[in-house]
Image: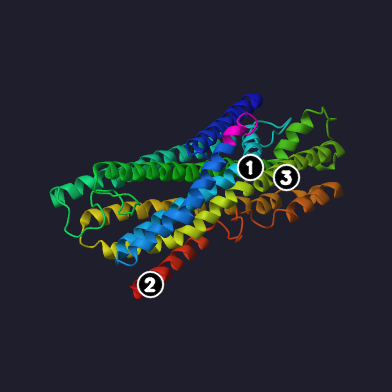
Amino acid sequence: MAQKLKNRREVYLKGYEESQCFLLRLGGMYVKNDKYKWLNKIYVTFYLGTFVMLIVFIGPYNFYVSIPIGETFTFFIVLHFWIVMIGYTGTSVMYHINGDSIDRALYMIGEGFYTYQGSKEEPEAKLIVEKNKKFLEKLTNFMIPNAIFVGLFVTCATPIVELVNLGGAIPEGSVLNPYLPLPIFWTWDQFTIHGYILSYLAVVLATIFIVLQLLALSLGYSSFMVSYITQFELLNLSIRNMESRATHYYLNLNPPIPRRGMSKFSDPLFQAAMRHCLKQNIQHHQALLRWMKEAQNFLGWALLTTFLATSILLATTGYLFLEANDSIFKLLTLIEVQVLELVHSYLFCWWGENLATESSKIPTSLYGVPWYQCDLKFRKMFHIMLSNCLDPLIPRDKVLKLKASLETYGSMISTSYTYFNVIRSAN
């Protein structure tokens, strides 16, 4: 039965691996390095080229055109779009550069991190895995339709609504074509049929790219964190059940029948069983620490993008609310976009908070073990593990070393409000 549960758990975790691979591949952020190294180079070249083009050409051109003619609404639309594109292309480049770390992280997830040899079945383990699986499914079912809806709403609904409002006419003196989904300046004429189609396709392709990247980052990160937090829950469960695990292992050693009134802790064989179980927990914890070290190489860049971009994006969206108060449709569009941005950034911080909470339970679980009845060798091992688990484990971004926590999320919201006030007072 224990082997059956172990196989089921490993199959499930390999399902996690396939899910993560699919999401990252869908967003063009990962290829298996051993098979498709040439494709990895193509992706890196494409994203680097896009990144440079955004910084050197598209952004400066739009700012240069929009500022002199007083198009503040267009300026902040472009700024918002520019930051999103730069953030996602930059993160994609770093994901491909750190493809080997993704390979190793996915391999560890697929292998189940650590297998407890000779331990008895733990019925609660299946419940923990199933609970987290269902939560990830619900999150996926929420994020994918909402992201697709926002993308379609922006690209398809805008021209239709403007057509109804304007009746097919172009406002006199209009510099931008109002029937385009996003009011962005192009180097070609937007009012010719070919220029309009080209501009429209450019916005559609950019929107598809943004939606895929958002889903790959949000759900990929969530999937990684769910599998990782699941392992901490299983580790805590195993530590709490250490005495019963040791008893199961001890009985398999065919120990001598103890004298009446004699504690099993007085038997050297049982002490060896307790040390064996603690050693397994230490090895499991070390495997989790190794995984986080690998994951920081790529997840840290996703966190950096989120932390840097969120405050500015929320501030610019807030200012656009003020500018778009004459159009219910524009307000609805901005609300949809802002909700998606808030959920996206909240997920990164919320998962980090959950990981910190679960990892901080290990010292409490360890203290519940009857260590005071164990021998000196056990207590030395116990002390080493306890001292290495006192600080909660929490993801950090790669450069600023900010924690992925709800406290950081609150700071981002506060900073965005400050930026919003600065923008409003400047205009």
- With 189 as the anchor, is 382 left or right in this view? right
Picture quadrant where residue 44 is located: top right
Where is mark 1, residue-wise? 237
Where is mark 2, residue-wise? 421
Secondary element at tag 1: helix
The count of marks equals 3
- Badge 2: residue crowd in 10 Å (few <14, some 14–19, many ≥20): some
Name the residue type under label 1: Leu
Residue 124 visible in the displayed image: no
Q: Position of residue 199 (x, y in %)?
A: 32, 45
Q: Which mark is residue 286?
A: 3
Quadrant of the frame with the C terminus = bottom left
Q: Position of residue 41 (x, y in %)?
A: 59, 38
Q: Please report whichever mark, 1 or 2, sits nearer to the chain's N-terminal start.
A: 1
Which is nearer the eye, 404 or 177?
A: 177
Q: Is residue 303 above or below residue 407?
A: above
Q: Position of residue 97 (x, y in %)?
A: 62, 44
Which is nearer the eye, 342 or 53?
A: 53
- Badge 3: residue crowd in 10 Å (few <14, some 14–19, many ≥20): some
Q: Which mark is residue 322?
A: none
Whether tag 3 and tag 1 are in contact, CB under 8 A, the answer is no
Q: Is residue 15 above or below residue 324?
A: above
Secondary element at tag 2: helix
